[in-house]
Amino acid sequence: MTKKHKSPEWSRTTRTIRAQVRAAHARGEQVACWRCGGPLPIDAEDKVVFDVGHLDPNGGEGIDNAAPEHRTKVGQCVGNRAHGGRMGAAITNAKRSTKTTFRPLPWA
Protein backbone atom coordinates (compact mmCIF):
# COMPACT_ATOMS: atom_id res chain seq x y z
CA MET A 1 0.00 0.00 0.00
CA THR A 2 1.40 3.37 -0.99
CA LYS A 3 1.83 6.36 1.25
CA LYS A 4 -1.00 8.05 -0.67
CA HIS A 5 -3.42 5.29 0.34
CA LYS A 6 -2.50 5.61 4.01
CA SER A 7 -3.07 9.38 4.23
CA PRO A 8 -5.90 10.75 6.38
CA GLU A 9 -7.25 12.71 3.39
CA TRP A 10 -7.58 9.55 1.26
CA SER A 11 -9.31 7.78 4.17
CA ARG A 12 -11.85 10.64 4.38
CA THR A 13 -12.29 10.60 0.62
CA THR A 14 -13.00 6.86 0.47
CA ARG A 15 -15.46 7.08 3.38
CA THR A 16 -17.29 9.91 1.62
CA ILE A 17 -17.46 8.12 -1.75
CA ARG A 18 -18.59 4.88 -0.11
CA ALA A 19 -21.34 6.71 1.80
CA GLN A 20 -22.50 8.42 -1.40
CA VAL A 21 -22.65 5.09 -3.27
CA ARG A 22 -24.55 3.40 -0.42
CA ALA A 23 -27.04 6.29 -0.30
CA ALA A 24 -27.58 6.16 -4.07
CA HIS A 25 -28.12 2.39 -3.91
CA ALA A 26 -30.59 2.82 -1.04
CA ARG A 27 -32.56 5.28 -3.21
CA GLY A 28 -32.70 2.62 -5.94
CA GLU A 29 -30.25 4.37 -8.24
CA GLN A 30 -27.76 2.38 -10.25
CA VAL A 31 -24.17 3.46 -9.65
CA ALA A 32 -21.78 3.40 -12.62
CA CYS A 33 -18.08 2.59 -12.79
CA TRP A 34 -16.07 5.66 -13.78
CA ARG A 35 -13.74 3.58 -15.99
CA CYS A 36 -16.31 1.93 -18.26
CA GLY A 37 -19.66 3.50 -17.35
CA GLY A 38 -21.13 0.08 -16.61
CA PRO A 39 -23.24 -0.61 -13.52
CA LEU A 40 -21.49 -1.76 -10.36
CA PRO A 41 -22.48 -5.29 -9.28
CA ILE A 42 -24.72 -6.08 -6.31
CA ASP A 43 -23.80 -9.04 -4.09
CA ALA A 44 -26.08 -11.61 -2.46
CA GLU A 45 -26.53 -9.37 0.59
CA ASP A 46 -27.81 -6.51 -1.64
CA LYS A 47 -24.61 -4.47 -1.24
CA VAL A 48 -22.77 -2.71 -4.04
CA VAL A 49 -19.38 -4.31 -4.70
CA PHE A 50 -16.80 -1.70 -5.71
CA ASP A 51 -13.50 0.00 -4.99
CA VAL A 52 -12.82 3.70 -4.76
CA GLY A 53 -10.26 4.50 -7.44
CA HIS A 54 -8.15 7.45 -8.51
CA LEU A 55 -9.30 9.29 -11.61
CA ASP A 56 -5.69 10.40 -12.12
CA PRO A 57 -3.09 8.05 -10.55
CA ASN A 58 -0.68 10.96 -10.18
CA GLY A 59 -3.34 13.27 -8.75
CA GLY A 60 -4.08 14.02 -5.14
CA GLU A 61 -6.07 12.23 -2.46
CA GLY A 62 -9.05 14.61 -2.57
CA ILE A 63 -12.65 13.89 -3.47
CA ASP A 64 -12.17 15.49 -6.89
CA ASN A 65 -9.75 12.67 -7.81
CA ALA A 66 -11.83 9.69 -6.66
CA ALA A 67 -14.79 7.73 -7.95
CA PRO A 68 -16.37 4.27 -7.64
CA GLU A 69 -15.16 1.59 -10.04
CA HIS A 70 -15.28 -2.15 -10.61
CA ARG A 71 -13.13 -4.06 -8.17
CA THR A 72 -12.12 -6.73 -10.67
CA LYS A 73 -12.23 -7.22 -14.44
CA VAL A 74 -15.76 -7.03 -15.81
CA GLY A 75 -16.16 -7.25 -19.57
CA GLN A 76 -13.82 -4.68 -21.11
CA CYS A 77 -13.26 -2.86 -17.80
CA VAL A 78 -9.89 -3.79 -16.31
CA GLY A 79 -10.98 -3.08 -12.72
CA ASN A 80 -9.17 -1.28 -9.93
CA ARG A 81 -7.11 -4.16 -8.55
CA ALA A 82 -5.69 -5.31 -11.88
CA HIS A 83 -4.87 -1.75 -12.88
CA GLY A 84 -3.14 -1.11 -9.55
CA GLY A 85 -1.21 -4.37 -9.88
CA ARG A 86 0.07 -3.37 -13.30
CA MET A 87 1.12 0.04 -12.01
CA GLY A 88 2.93 -1.55 -9.06
CA ALA A 89 4.69 -4.02 -11.34
CA ALA A 90 5.81 -1.20 -13.62
CA ILE A 91 7.29 0.68 -10.65
CA THR A 92 9.07 -2.44 -9.41
CA ASN A 93 10.41 -3.33 -12.85
CA ALA A 94 11.67 0.22 -13.40
CA LYS A 95 13.71 -0.02 -10.18
CA ARG A 96 15.40 -3.23 -11.24
CA SER A 97 18.88 -3.01 -12.58
CA THR A 98 19.34 -3.06 -16.32
CA LYS A 99 22.55 -5.05 -15.93
CA THR A 100 22.47 -8.46 -17.46
CA THR A 101 23.72 -11.55 -15.72
CA PHE A 102 24.43 -13.28 -19.02
CA ARG A 103 27.97 -14.54 -19.34
CA PRO A 104 29.04 -16.06 -22.65
CA LEU A 105 30.28 -19.58 -22.43
CA PRO A 106 34.03 -19.90 -23.00
CA TRP A 107 33.56 -22.20 -25.98
CA ALA A 108 30.94 -20.05 -27.70
Image: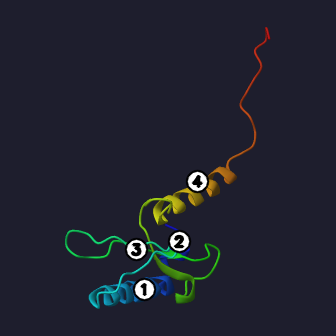
Residue 78, numbered label: none
- Which of pointers 4 and 2 lies earlier in the amino acid sequence? 2
- Residue picked out by circle 4: 89
- Residue picked out by circle 2: 35
Question: What percent of the width, then of the height, locates residue 67?
Answer: 49, 80
Q: Secondary structure at mark 3?
A: loop
Q: Residue at x 32, y 90 (%)?
A: 23
Viewer-proximal residue among 9 and 67:
67
- Residue picked out by circle 3: 39
- Which of pointers 4 and 1 lies earlier in the amino acid sequence? 1
Q: CA distance from mark 2 to mark 1?
A: 15 Å
Q: Secondary structure at mark 1?
A: helix
Question: What percent of the width, then of the height, locates residue 25?
Answer: 31, 85
Q: Residue at x 29, y 91 (%)?
A: 27
Task: For the C terminus, give its image quadrant.
Answer: top right
Looking at the image, residue 107 sits to the left or right of residue 76; the answer is right
- Which of pointers 2 and 1 lies earlier in the amino acid sequence? 1
CB-based contact (under 8 Å), mark 4 and mark 2: no
**Amino acid type of the residue that numbered disc 2 sits on in the rendered structure:** Arg
Q: CA distance from mark 1 to mark 3?
A: 16 Å
**Amino acid type of the residue that numbered disc 4 sits on in the rendered structure:** Ala
- Residue picked out by circle 1: 17
